[in-house]
Image (tube, rainbow, N blue to C red):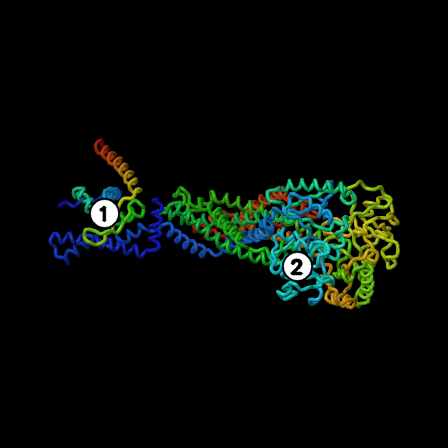
């Protein structure tokens, strides 16, 4: 109550100062009037009475001033004074301010940038309502729950019909179709869906409608929903497009609606541009009736109140029933659910958390640096503080003053840090691997800004408090007597050394972690992929299915294409293959069996990656032949089926025997039971990732297993642009409506395949560089300060005959001691911590002696260099000046 | 007429609180009343009265209102707040402790 009244009154007097002054004036006037009246009662004439009254009242202005003082809103005014004083102090010491703000900015900028990414990827909710209710369905072998597979259309229908736990179940598959009739032919990312996916993800159309259940029925009219981006870029945002038809793979689809750009599924994949019913897809449509083809990804929304465990139990029962009812396709399989969010962020969580920890270490180093700086600053102000205390300032008041200064520094550093973070996030855009997140979704946003602000204030206050307390000793006299120096040295020097050691050891940890990642990255990029990517250009050619519907047409196309390409000037070799190593759409993995070997128990299978290639492929890629022969033009659809296997497949499944002449059964569904004779063994290829050991691989001749297009690979010493022009020209000379996309040098494709590694290596590498700089600044600060404090001592030593060399040893020795202790502790810490990044490493152990050794040498070198500058200053001390000064 | 004794430092707050405890008064009234009740022994100078009043008001122990005075024009009347009453009790207690201590000291020294 009282507090409220006081606050009211103080606010009143703050806001209405003139008003309060006027009231005071009136009050005093009233008093003087009374005095005048009193005098007049005594018989004094009026004008004289007023003079007497005024005299009796005393000095009006000083009374007024005193009254004003009582209502002074002291803490606000003190605060304003502190801020003014703080700004003045910071401006008087520009070097100190610059170093402190710079240090903070680096620490806070880096943390804020990483936090922005974490915010965008891990914390942000997915753009669907109740995203935690969304699960993905997979068919998995009972004994291999991690071998996730799709679901066949039949099994999907069973899931839909039998479930009691989901409010919606939908299926989706992805396929690229060729859009013609609207400018250049283009490949559009098409989602083949069942119509339930729209209500499941709460997709609301921008125009028209989404797919309705009727659109998913067999025999329904072909309709398509377009993305807003496609609608704008290809159709000029024409609202009349709804109701018109477009041509996909040369077949007409009626556009029924436009989905807004904000709708994305899957959240982290390339944008989908067209949605059609899976039954209408030229590739998947016919396969919806083949129960052995697991073409659909299942997605479902849990009914409210149903837990994942309940749903999983229900699906297990269903899986068992399917296995019993359809033993041919489903025996040994069960259905597994995974939360959608987990699937989306699973691969990223670990790496991001590691980055976040690394950046926290960096921030800690920055904090230690700040504390060190403030400490030096505060102790060197010991005498000033002593004077102020002697003049009546309370200890609390002085601590507050020093804290205000720290807070100012913190805010400045915070602002600089946020600017740095905005810049960093902006420039990281080109670095972030596209699967990490939709690039545009990473921003320094509100939540992140609050994070940065709190971080900078907390940093400044936490690390300003100790110096502030140390600077205001309870015993005033020591400070006066010793000019405020020794008081600081007693507690201060130890704290400062401790901080410097902590900084060095943390920097050591980051340095080792960064070093390990850099070494991994160097190893990954220098690993032999099993083929020669130099001078190879790839391009994607896709044949519209409704026009090129038969395998004969596909073969005919390749038979026309390859000789014409070969005839172009400057082309050394050319081939057609699908898929290529590092294909962004992933590799094809098929089960196979070896003719003559005993059959595997049900539910078990052996798999290998599969590629269909034209005969020139092995020449273009320079994949060496180990045994037997390569494919030739004679391997055609009319000749016996043949296959080439990789070294690993040969070693693993044909140990101690010659695989040439043996038969294997495998193939692109539905031709998965075709027996093929092994004619050759070629070298292993890293096809999934450079960091992944090559797995078993099988190749078939394109002529015997043609596809609706594929990747053209060309070896040529010409530049990419002329090669690209040649490929386009040749393809268009066959069919001017065929799109040629993704023309890239194979080197770039390889580079993109290591984007993740490059990204985190770059980040951790920068963190360790920053850490190194900060540690250097820290040790420089401690040694310089110590030299400044010991000038007197050094003067005496020199006067007593110490040589410059002795001084050098004294000061450098101090720095070396700190550096050795710090890196010693750091090595132990790094030893304990690097196992946390084991999963990010490739080819180096977490205790790689080379990395550890190099880090120690670099850190010690930097630390000694940093202490060398103040050492030189110490060596130049003139004993006479130093002694006279005291 | 002997000059009234100056007030002991710190007792002024107590006197003001006690004076306005009975009824609201303006500054001049408070000064007059202290002088009158003490039999003209104590006098409060304007130089210390007004700052004291404003300080007490800022501390929330007295509150002020502009009311019509006997002079026919508005004056600032001070009255005791509930918190001020508690403060007055505290000050009375500490005053009686102090005065009895001083009394004891004088008697026995």
Q: Chain of mark 1?
A: B
B44 over A183 or under it: above or below: above
Indicate the secondary structure of the residue bearing disc 1. strand
> Which one is in front, A57 or A126?
A126
Return the mark for residue A796: none
Indicate the secondary structure of the residue bearing disc 2. strand
Residue A223 visible somewhere in the drawing: yes
> Which one is in front, A686 or B30?
B30
Closer to the eye: label 2 or 1: 2
**Residue A178 sits in quarter:** bottom right
Residue A555 picture location, percent across and down:
82, 60
Residue A860 visible somewhere in the drawing: no
Q: Chain of mark 2?
A: A
Q: Alpha-carbon distance for marks 2 and 1?
A: 84 Å
Q: Is residue A189 left or right of residue A417?
A: right
Cβ atoms under marks 2 and 1 closer than 8 Å: no
Q: Is residue A432 left or right of residue A700?
A: left
Return the mark for residue A225: 2
Residue A225 picture location, percent across and down:
66, 59
> Quick one: which residue is furthest to the top in this view?
B108
Residue A393 picture location, percent across and down:
37, 47
**Residue A245 sits in quarter:** bottom right
> Which one is in front, A592 or A757?
A592
Assign the C terminus of chain B to one quadrant of the image: top left
Which residue position is annotated with label 1?
A: B25
| Circle 2 residues within 10 Å: few <14, some 14–19, many ≥20 | many
Q: Is residue A38 left or right of residue A83?
A: left
Residue B33 picture location, percent across and down:
19, 45
Report the residue at 62% width, 41% height from top.
A307
Tell if the residue under mark 2 belongs to the same chain as the one under mark 1. no
């Amino acid at each position: 109550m009282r507090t409220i009244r006081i606050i009211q009154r103080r606010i009143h007097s703050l806001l209405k100062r003139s008003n309060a002054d006027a009231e005071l004036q009136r009050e005093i006037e009233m008093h003087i009037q009374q005095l005048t009246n009193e005098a007049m009662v005594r018989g004094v004439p009026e004008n004289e009475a007023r003079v007497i009254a005024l005299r009796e009242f005393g000095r009006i202005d000083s009374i007024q001033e005193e009254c004003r003082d009582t209502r002074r809103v002291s803490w606000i005014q003190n605060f304003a004074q502190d801020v003014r004083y703080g700004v003045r102090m910071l401006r008087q010491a520009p070097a100190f301010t610059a170093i402190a703000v710079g240090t903070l900015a680096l620490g806070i900028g880096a943390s804020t940038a990483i936090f922005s990414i974490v915010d965008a990827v891990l914390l942000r909710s997915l753009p669907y309502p109740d995203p935690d209710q969304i699960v993905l369905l997979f068919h998995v072998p009972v004994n291999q729950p991690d071998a996730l597979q799709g679901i066949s259309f039949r099994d999907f229908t069973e899931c839909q019909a039998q479930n009691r736990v989901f409010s919606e179940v939908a299926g989706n598959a992805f396929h690229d179709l060729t859009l013609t009739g609207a400018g250049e032919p283009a490949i559009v990312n098409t989602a083949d869906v069942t119509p339930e996916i729209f209500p499941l993800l709460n997709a609301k159309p921008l125009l028209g409608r989404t797919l309705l259940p009727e659109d998913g029925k067999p025999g329904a009219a072909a309709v398509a929903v377009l993305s807003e981006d496609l609608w704008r870029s290809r159709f000029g945002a024409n609202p009349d497009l709804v109701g018109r038809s477009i041509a996909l793979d040369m077949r007409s689809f009626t556009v029924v609606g436009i989905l807004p750009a904000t709708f994305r599924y899957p959240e982290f994949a390339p944008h989908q541009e067209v949605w059609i019913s899976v039954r209408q897809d030229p590739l998947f449509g016919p396969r919806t009736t083949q129960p052995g083809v697991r073409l659909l990804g299942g997605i479902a929304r849990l009914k409210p109140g149903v837990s994942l465990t309940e749903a999983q139990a229900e699906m297990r029962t269903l899986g068992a029933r399917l296995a019993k009812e359809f033993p041919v396709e489903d025996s040994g399989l069960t259905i597994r659910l995974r939360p959608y969010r987990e699937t989306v962020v699973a691969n990223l969580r670990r790496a991001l958390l590691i980055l976040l920890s690394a950046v926290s270490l960096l921030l800690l180093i920055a904090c230690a640096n700040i504390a060190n700086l403030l400490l030096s600053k505060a102790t060197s102000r010991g005498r000033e503080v002593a004077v102020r205390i002697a003049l009546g300032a309370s200890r609390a008041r002085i601590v507050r003053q020093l804290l205000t200064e720290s807070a100012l520094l913190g805010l400045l550093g915070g602002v600089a840090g946020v600017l740095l973070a905005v810049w960093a996030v902006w420039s990281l855009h080109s670095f972030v691997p596209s699967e990490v997140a939709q690039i545009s979704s990473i921003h320094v946003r509100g939540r992140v800004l609050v994070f940065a602000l709190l971080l900078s204030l907390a940093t400044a206050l936490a690390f300003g408090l100790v110096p502030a307390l140390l600077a205001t000793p309870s015993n005033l006299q020591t400070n006066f007597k010793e000019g405020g120096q020794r008081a600081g040295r007693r507690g201060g020097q130890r704290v400062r050394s401790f901080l410097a050691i902590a900084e060095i050891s943390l920097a050591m940890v980051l340095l080792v972690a960064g070093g390990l990642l850099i070494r991994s990255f160097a190893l990954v990029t220098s690993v032999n992929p099993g083929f020669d990517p130099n001078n190879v250009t790839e391009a994607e050619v896709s044949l519209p299915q409704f026009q090129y519907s038969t395998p004969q047409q596909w073969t005919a196309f390749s038979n026309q294409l390859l000789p014409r390409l070969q005839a172009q000037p400057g082309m050394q070799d050319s081939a057609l293959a699908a898929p290529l190593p590092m294909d962004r759409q992933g590799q094809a993995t098929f089960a196979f069996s070896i003719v003559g070997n005993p059959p595997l128990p049900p539910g078990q299978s052996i798999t290998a990656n599969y590629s269909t290639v034209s005969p020139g492929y092995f020449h273009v890629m320079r994949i060496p032949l180990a045994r037997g022969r390569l494919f030739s033009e004679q391997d055609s659809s009319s000749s016996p089926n043949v296959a080439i296997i990789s070294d690993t497949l040969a070693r693993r499944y044909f140990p101690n025997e010659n695989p040439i002449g043996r038969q294997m059964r495998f193939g692109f569904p539905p031709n998965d039971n075709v027996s093929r004779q092994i004619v050759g063994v070629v070298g292993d290829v890293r096809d999934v990732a450079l960091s992944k050991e090559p797995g078993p691989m099988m190749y078939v001749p394109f002529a015997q297993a043609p596809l609706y297009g594929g990747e053209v690979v060309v070896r040529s010493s010409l530049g990419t642009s002329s090669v690209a022009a040649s490929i386009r020209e040749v393809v268009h000379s066959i069919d001017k409506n065929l799109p040629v996309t993704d023309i890239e040098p194979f080197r770039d494709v390889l580079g993109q395949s290591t984007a993740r590694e490059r990204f985190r290596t770059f980040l951790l590498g920068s963190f360790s560089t920053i850490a190194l700089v900060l540690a250097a600044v820290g040790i420089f600060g401690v040694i310089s300060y110590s030299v400044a404090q010991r000038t007197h001592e050094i003067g005496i030593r020199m006067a007593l005959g110490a040589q410059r060399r002795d001084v050098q040893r004294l000061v450098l020795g101090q720095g070396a001691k700190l550096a050795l202790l710090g890196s010693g502790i750091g090595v132990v810490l790094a030893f304990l911590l690097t196992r946390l990044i084991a999963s990010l490493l490739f080819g180096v152990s977490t205790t790689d002696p080379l990395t550890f050794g190099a880090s120690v040498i670099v850190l010690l070198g930097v630390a000694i260099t940093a202490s060398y500058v103040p050492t030189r200053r110490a060596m130049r001390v003139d004993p006479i000046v130093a002694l006279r000064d005291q | 007429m002997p000059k009234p004794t100056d007030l002991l430092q710190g007792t002024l707050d107590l006197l003001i609180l006690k004076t306005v405890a009975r009824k609201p008064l303006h500054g001049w009234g408070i000064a007059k009343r202290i002088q009158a009740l003490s039999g003209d022994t104590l006098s409060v100078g304007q130089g210390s009265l007004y700052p004291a009043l404003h300080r007490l008001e800022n501390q929330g122990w007295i509150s002020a209102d502009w009311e019509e005075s006997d002079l026919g024009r508005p004056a600032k009347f001070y009255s005791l707040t509930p918190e001020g009453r508690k403060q007055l009790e505290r000050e009375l207690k500490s005053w009686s402790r102090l005065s009895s201590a001083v009394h004891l000291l004088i008697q026995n020294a």
